[in-house]
Amino acid sequence: MTTIDKLLIRGIRAFDPDNKSTIEFHKPLTLIVGPNGSGKTTIIECLKQVGGTARLPPYTLLQIGLTLLCYCR
């Protein structure tokens, strides 16, 4: 089984194209919480993209630059 250790997101919806945002996933559980518009759904959509089960989220800033890296074990 593959586990995701961290996810680096840049340039997708609420995530600034000029700054890299890294989310670390801790065992056995990581909760994603925050106010409306903070990027919770974007994180889930990016995880689906990395897993190959979805397209990129709407409003992805492809013209500015997109970074989506997954560090797996």
Image (cartoon, grey):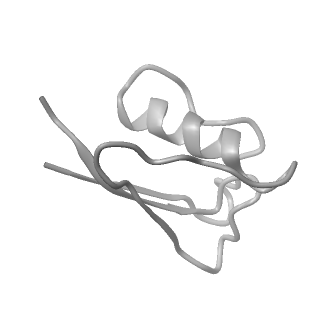
Above-or-below relation of 27 to 21:
above
The residue lying at 64 percent from left, 53 percent from top is 62
The residue lying at 68 percent from left, 59 percent from top is 63
The residue lying at 52 percent from left, 41 percent from top is 46
x and y, in percent, of residue 22 in the image: 47, 68
The furthest residue to the right: 36
Horizontal placement of 64 versus 9: left or right? right
Horizontal placement of 51 versus 62: left or right? left
Q: How many marks?
A: 0
x and y, in percent, of residue 40 in the image: 68, 46
The furthest residue to the top: 53
Q: Nearer the viewer, residue 73 or 62?
A: 73
Above-or-below relation of 22 to 36:
below
Horizontal placement of 27 versus 19: left or right? left
Q: Quadrant of the N terminus?
A: top left
Horizontal placement of 44 versus 28: left or right? right
x and y, in percent, of residue 5 in the image: 28, 55
Q: Nearer the viewer, residue 51 or 61?
A: 51
x and y, in percent, of residue 51 in the image: 35, 30
The residue lying at 53 percent from left, 74 percent from top is 20
Quadrant in the picture for residue 56? top right
The furthest residue to the front: 28
